[in-house]
Amino acid sequence: MGAWQACRRGGSALAAALLLALPAGGWAGDDAESWSRERKAFWLNGAIVGGVTAYGFGVWNWGESSFRTESEGWFGRDTASGGADKLGHAYAGAVSTAIAASLYRRWGYAEREAARLGAFSGLLLTTTVEVGDGFSPDHGFSWEDQVANMAGVGLEYLRLRYPEWGERVQFRWEYFPSPAMRDGREYDITTDYSGSRWLLAFPLQAWGAGETPLRWVELQAGYGTRGYSSTDRDYFDAPSRHPFIGVGIHVPLVLGRMGAPAGVQRVFEYVQVPGTAWPLPP
């Protein structure tokens, strides 16, 4: 995957969040109040397909080639990003599902229905992007990317469907700008893989720590890569992959004790604050 290709494809993670977040504000007016929840769901999913498709034809060169597939590999050393892009796809699927489910809850769907419909919308968005890439001369449909999309959506569905496990397992993205980003040679944070890590966090509070001091602690396992982008070559001797385990502070609990709203606490179930955990190896 070339640098330009990676920039465009990785941007779908940000597009996913934006496309799903817009209706939350745009449909909050008086006119929207007369819509049934089913009508809102229909138009949300229609907007996902229509918006992504229009953007793909206008910006990503969709339709300029016949449909084709492309095998990108997984987490091998010789892949384009060492597998970091696959975790980016999974994360986009998870966050898209979470945002969509929150909209469905707001529109009156029960938790179980919201989880199911949220997973449908998250998978619809990520699959539309991937299928559209199949008609692009720059990309091609990647089964590896699609499996990663499905994994992220599936994980978030299980977290939403079974809240007790949602508290026990959280999928997060940690970002601190890479040297290339800080020097102005990289511009897209969604593909700044040398500044990104993805992790699963296991808060001990949800695993029986109770009111002991361990309730402030969480265990982590994650993965990141460094030096794979062409803009990284002046900063790293060679591309490298970094699986890690770690111990961190459970930031959502800290924020809750400080009086932060529940919505703010929930954001940090998906975002890892740099410097709040100690990974091994660093």
Image (cartoon, rainbow, N blue to C red):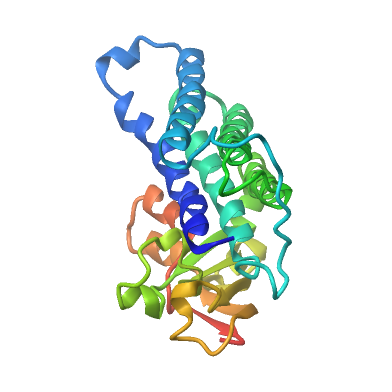
Instruction: Identify the residue shown where x is 62% and y is 72%.
Output: 223
Tell me the quarter of the picture where residue 17 sits: top left
| Rendered-image quadrant of the N terminus | bottom right
Instruction: Identify the residue shown where x is 73% and y is 71%.
Output: 76
Q: Nearer the viewer, residue 65 or 105?
A: 65
Answer above or below: position of 111 versus 169.
above
Instruction: Identify the residue shown where x is 65% and y is 34%.
Output: 66
Answer above or below: position of 155 versus 225.
above
Answer above or below: position of 135 versus 71.
above
Q: Nearer the viewer, residue 116 or 175?
A: 175
* Residue 41 image position (x, y, % from top left): 50, 21
* Residue 27 image position (x, y, % from top left): 33, 23
Q: Nearer the viewer, residue 225 or 217?
A: 225
Instruction: Identify the residue shown where x is 50% and y is 28%.
Output: 104
Tell me the quarter of the picture where residue 65 sits: top right
* Residue 234 image position (x, y, % from top left): 44, 85
* Residue 135 image position (x, y, % from top left): 60, 37
| Number of disc labels | 0
- Residue most extreme to the bottom: 237
| Rendered-image quadrant of the C terminus | bottom right
The answer to whether residue 213 is seen in the rendering is no
The answer to whether residue 128 is seen in the rendering is yes
